[in-house]
Amino acid sequence: MVSLASCQEPADQALKTGGTEAQFNASLEAIYPKLTADQQEAFHWAVGDYNLGGLDRDYPNGSPRQIVQGQARRLMPSLSDRIRELEQQKAQQQAILADLAHIEALAPTFVIEPSDFGQQPTIRAVIKNGSSRVISKARWEAAMYLDNRPRPVIKSVVLDDYRRRGGLAPGASLSTTIPLGMAFGDNAWKSLEIQQARSRHVTLKALPESVLDEGGRPVLAPGLNDELAELKALQDKLQAYAVL
């Protein structure tokens, strides 16, 4: 038996799960230092939510490899189901994104005008809702181009709120005024470079992830792409663990 155990790889040697914590720890301490770094990481993941009783129930006297592979294979089906569900949602999101692309700012203009607190940089535009959804709020990326340069000299994200005007219905348009900065105005938008430029061109681009419907809910599911990427990375890891 001693000879047989010595021929086994460390990851295939049995752990003492049916005894005391001390017995289990002693069996693990005899094996753990001999595992590769990947095997150690995988084992930590596999036993992370277990106590000794649960481990003995599911993997009686199991080896590190049996425990890791068993946990990976156990979780793969539910993980794959969740990924398929999110991919279906992502396909739906693509259709929503195409719809939201029809929200646009027509003829945006930039002015610096006097206010009670000094000069106030402001963008005026007509917002057209060419989408099929009622909009209560949206954020826009504002960019300033000077003297026909290819790159903007400044960008900012600004909020436009349509609730006080009954929202922006599908197909509707309204004129809006968007101040840049709080009461004193954003100094970056009233720099000498901007004020003295021969020509100025400002753009407004709607940020789809910021669009809220009439109930104040995001039209796009927040964080879906991040969650899908995270789950796919976990799926890759489990597939590696399943054959570790």
Image (tube, grey):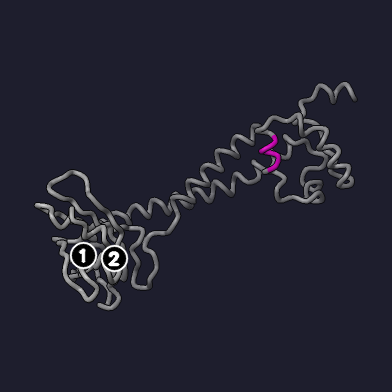
Disc 2 secondary structure class: loop
Disc 1 secondary structure class: strand
Q: Is residue 201 left or right of residue 13?
A: left
> Which of the two discs, 2 and 1, labels the residue nearer the N terminus?
1
At 18% from the left and 56% from the top, the residue drawn is 192
Q: Which residues are magenta?
A: 40-44
Decide: is 140 above or below 14: below
Say which residue label 1 marks. 121
Q: Amino acid at mark 1?
A: Pro
Is residue 157 highlighted in magenta? no
At 20% from the left and 68% from the top, the residue drawn is 119
Q: Residues within 10 Å of mark 1 (few under 14, many from 20)?
A: many
Say which quarter of the image contains residue 176. bottom left
Decide: is 111 above or below 69: below
Say which residue label 2 marks. 181
At 89% from the left and 47% from the top, the residue drawn is 20
Q: Quadrant of the N terminus?
A: top right
Q: Is residue 128 visible?
A: no
Say which quarter of the image contains residue 169. bottom left
Query: Closest to the observer: 168 or 176?
Result: 176
At 70% from the left and 48% from the top, the residue drawn is 48
Q: Amino acid at mark 2?
A: Gly
Q: What's the distance in space between the residues labelled 2 and 1, CA to CA?
A: 8 Å
Task: Assign the magenta stretch its main secondary structure.
Answer: helix
Q: Position of residue 179 (x, y in %)?
A: 24, 68
